[in-house]
Each structure stands twice: as structure tokens, then as C-alpha cells.
Amino acid sequence: MMDGYLWARALHVISFISWMAGLLYLPRLYVYHCRQAPGSEASETFKVMERRLLRAIMNPAMIATFVFGGILIWYLGSEAWTMGWLHAKLALVVAMAVIHGYLAKWRKDFAADRNQRSETFYRVINEVPTILMIAIVILAVLKPF
């Protein structure tokens, strides 16, 4: 039983790292995409990069993070739901998923040449996943409450 838990934990960490890589890189692509004229060759290249990053890496990594996280909770059993740190972590993971959803929406705006946001906006948004990740890791490792 412990081997299964350890494998699930390892795969959960790997998935989360992959998801975070995309959450940190996609807004950075948007920063550079903002500088390109709609329809230009560079803009079209960014569209391909953004779509592939979201569909081939971020979406599967997010799903895997949820699946392996759910398996970990299952291994912990009903006692897991009494752990305050877990509730806080899950709330932050939901916030991370919301950011993911907005990044996906903004990708569609870029794909249709409808982006209305500035380079500065995406620079600020780029920091949000980092802040959430720090809090999530602290909760998961230290289990402060």
C-alpha cells in the first residue's frame, strides 16, 4: 500500500511541476505576443506555440495533478478531510485552475487577434501562479494546521 502512495505522490509532484512550467511560460509568451502586429509571421508563430503549450502540456499536466492528488487523498482516507492545511491547499489549487482557465480564454483571444490586454497586464499575471505555488508547497510540506 505504501508503494502505491509513494508512486502517486511522485507522479503528483511531477504533474504539478509540469503544470507550473506551463503556467509560468504561457503568460510570458503573451508578453512577447503583445509586441507583434496581428497577422504577422511572428504573431502566427506565437499562436502555434501557445496552443501547443496549453493543449499538449498544461491541460494534461493539470488533469494528472488532479488525478494523482485525488489518489493521495484517497490513500489518506476520511482523516484527510479533518486536515485544515489540505482544505487551504485545495482552495489554492482551485485558484490555480481558475488562472489556467483565464489563460486558456486569453489564448483564444490572441488566436482570433482580439487581445485587449497590455504587456504589463500579462507581466503581472505571470506572478500569480508563483505566489500560489509558494503557498501550496508550504502547506503541503509544513502542514501548519
Image: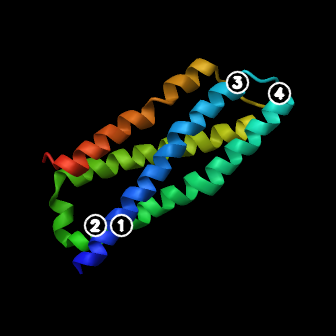
Question: Which disc, if any, is residue 34?
Answer: 3
Q: Would residue 51 be found to the left or right of residue 144 on screen?
A: right
> In terms of sequence position, does the residue under pointer 3 or pointer 1 come before the other?
3
Instruction: Name the disc covering residue 38, or none.
Output: 4
Helix or strand or loop: what does disc 2 sit on?
helix
Distance of label 4 from label 2 (alpha carbons): 46 Å
Q: Is residue 104 above or below residue 12?
A: above
Q: Residues within 10 Å of mark 4 (few under 14, many from 20)?
A: some
Occupied quadrant, residue 5: bottom left
Amino acid beneath label 3 = Cys
Number of numbered discs visible in the structure rendering: 4
Residue 81: mark: none
What amino acid type is highlighted by mark number 4?
Pro
The picture quadrant where one finds residue 2 is bottom left
Asked whether residue 112 appears in the rendered view, the answer is no
Q: Secondary structure at mark 1?
A: helix
- Residue pictured at 23% horizontal, 46% vertical: 139
Query: Which secondary structure, mark 3?
Result: helix
- Mark 1 or 4 closer to N-term? 4
Residue that label 1 marks? 70
Are discs 4 and 2 less than 8 Å apart at CB?
Answer: no
Residue 34 horizontal side relative to residue 94, left or right? right
Alpha carbon of mark 2 to alpha carbon of mark 3: how far? 41 Å
